[in-house]
Amino acid sequence: MAVTKKGILNKLYIVFVFVTILLVAVVVRLTNIQFADGDKYRSLSEQLTLRNDTIFANRGNVFSADGSLLATSMPQYEIRMDAFTVKSEDFEKNIRALSMELSKMLGGTASKWETQIRKARKNKNRYLFIARKLGYTDYMKIKSFPIFNLGMYKGGFIAEQSTVRAHPLGKVAERTIGYDDYRGGPGIEGAFRRYLKGRHGWRMKQKIAKGQWKPINDNNEKEPVDGKDIVTTIDVNIQDIAHHSLLKQLEYYSADHGCVVVMETKTGEIKAISNLGRNSEGKYYERLNYAVGESHEPGSAFKLMAMVVALESGKIDTSTVVDTGNGRYKMYGRYINDSKRGGYGKISAARALEVSSNIAFARLIEENFGKKPDEFIDALKEMNVDKRLGLPLKGEGVPLIPSPGHKLWSKNALPSIAYGYNLKLTPLQTLTFYNAIANNGEMVKPKFVKEIRSWDQHVESFGKEIINPAVCSKETVKKIQEVLKNVVEKGTGRKLYAENFSMAGKTGTARTEYGNYQEWVKDKKYVSSFAGYFPAEDPKYSCIVVIHKPKVQTGYYGADVSGPVFKDIAQKIYTSNYIINEVDKRMPNFKSVQNSFNTYYTISNKEYNSIPNVKGMAGMDAISLLENLGLKVNFYGTGKVVEQSINEGEKIIKGATIKIKLT
């Protein structure tokens, strides 16, 4: 028996020793993990369960010149609930009230919300989805709901903030405002991203069930710094005028696409820029920035540049006579045609620009520069016609002015260039030259941004940049200005002439897509344009309108398609802009008006205890006088009072009706 007990004890000792050794090993290992390898495992744990989550900074706002908001960052919130963390007492006391508030705000029945939240609490769901894409006002409202108003830890309220870019004025200059991405997007948003983007903050989050992450405190660890604001040169009123005028014309002519730019002459500030293209359903929208990026053959709009070169060279004057014949002229085996049937005959160079004669310009340039074409091309280059404008916006089109030796050069190259073919410019590049003529020869760089601001603090300004202080002599400028004015008064733009408002400019009509000659003959396509400035005598604004592929059956000439848009924009700006529309403040000396006013002033300043005699008074004056005495006035006719229903001298009864007859 003793032996048996001893054997059992030995076995117990062995087990005890083994357990002790195992326990010591565990303690040693735990100690080693806690102290020797503690940092390693804590770091590993944090990597698996904690992370720094980026809080994206709000991008700066983009404003128009008059302070209207063009683009802004709008906060959006996603709301979730830790249904398990709420104390039972608080939960049962307020769950019904919370459900009712959620029902009112987000829809669905209160009972459905209560069932959903109770189920989440039962299942220990600590990240129950409530709503997403809430604005700041709704976020503040839902945050005040029962239970949620207890905060994150006591009320289980979890709010995830994000930002979205919004355009409060809709599609206004959308392509020019642009957007930003990690590579730097198009438009102002992309070009000035270093100012707009700000600095991001971060917030610590902890991993919970089902791979979800929950903020572990109410406060941000590092607050984001919002981006700076951009103040553009865009004038919302002018932009609205330009957009709707262009849209109306595109729709009327069923055109493929078009653009319009309005530039302030002295500064180069872009006051409006609209780019409209058609989608598959035929609706127009801001598809691409055609004004900045689309190079095309300008057609007759380029004759201005050719004329300036020819005048500056001294080889011709505005009075130089050129024979255009019967409107059809053969040069190097190819026929050149004018739009007028029967031709213009012998005309001056000035008249050639006014009526836009292709033959005249082909002959003038070929006969004076044909032996030395480089002289003509180099003169264009000296006027910066061949260079990009150096805009901050991405995607500016490359101008093309071929020289002898270029693959596009041939015997017909020079005469073709003279009237706007065999070269390419963007609408904004063309406008910049026209603006230089309006600005007495000084070529200024188009400007889209005026200044950078941070809240109300000025950060940086962008002043006028001069590309070329003088594209030509003052003498040439004056001659060209007079001819461009005549284009509207008695040339191709005469349909645009308005006696009370002066404009100057040049029409342009160019055929396009003529690579396939047979297709081109069967289905001709055109680019219609008008470039100019207003008022003609003291230009405040320059403007270009370019419309691609209008329906030929409706019309395609620049004066018919693009010219009316220019005129509409110019006149609406003129009538709405106090800078241009300077009214003579002197009082007109009309005796009849003055006498009528004196009569009314004398009568109206009397104190009446009875009905006055208003016969012979102007109807408007009589009505005003009688109503000021407390009478109701019924009248018929127009002119002066000849009859009154209540005779002079009768007692005035407030509210009584008096009838008067006017003739």
Image: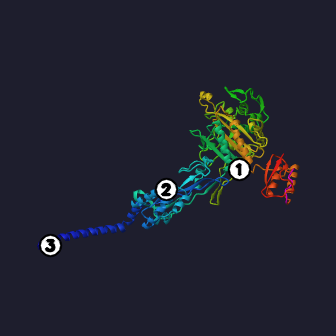
Q: What SS does tag 1 mark?
A: loop
Question: Is 612 one of the magenta-colored residues?
Answer: yes
Gap in angstroms between the C-alphas marked 1 and 3: 111 Å
Q: How crowded is mark 3: few (under 14 residues within 10 Å), some or many (20 or more)?
A: few
Which quarter of the rendering shows the C terminus?
A: top right
Q: Residue furthest left?
A: 1
> Residue 654 versus residue 533: which sits nearer the camera?
654
Gap in angstroms between the C-alphas marked 2 and 1: 49 Å
Residue 267 got which mark? 1
Q: How crowded is mark 2: few (under 14 residues within 10 Å), some or many (20 or more)?
A: some
Q: What stretch is highlighted in magenta?
A: 609-615
Residue 6 got which mark? 3
Q: In this view, does 589 lie to the left or right of 451?
A: right
Residue 257: x and y in percent read 62, 39
Q: Of label 2 and label 1, which has the lower sequence position? A: 2
Relative to 235, is 375 above or below?
A: above
Q: What SS does tag 2 mark?
A: strand
Q: Which residue lies furthest to the bottom in this view?
A: 2
Number of the front mark, 1 or 3: 3
Q: Of label 2 and label 3, which has the lower sequence position? A: 3
Q: How crowded is mark 1: few (under 14 residues within 10 Å), some or many (20 or more)?
A: some
| Residue located beneath label 2 in the image | 131
Question: Is 526 one of the magenta-colored residues?
Answer: no
Instruction: Tell me which corner region of the image, top left, top right, bottom left or bottom right, holds residue 570.
Output: top right
Number of the front mark, 2 or 3: 2
- Determine if residue 451 is in view: yes
Query: Looking at the picture, which amino acid does disc 2 mark?
Result: Ala
- Main SS of the magenta part reads loop
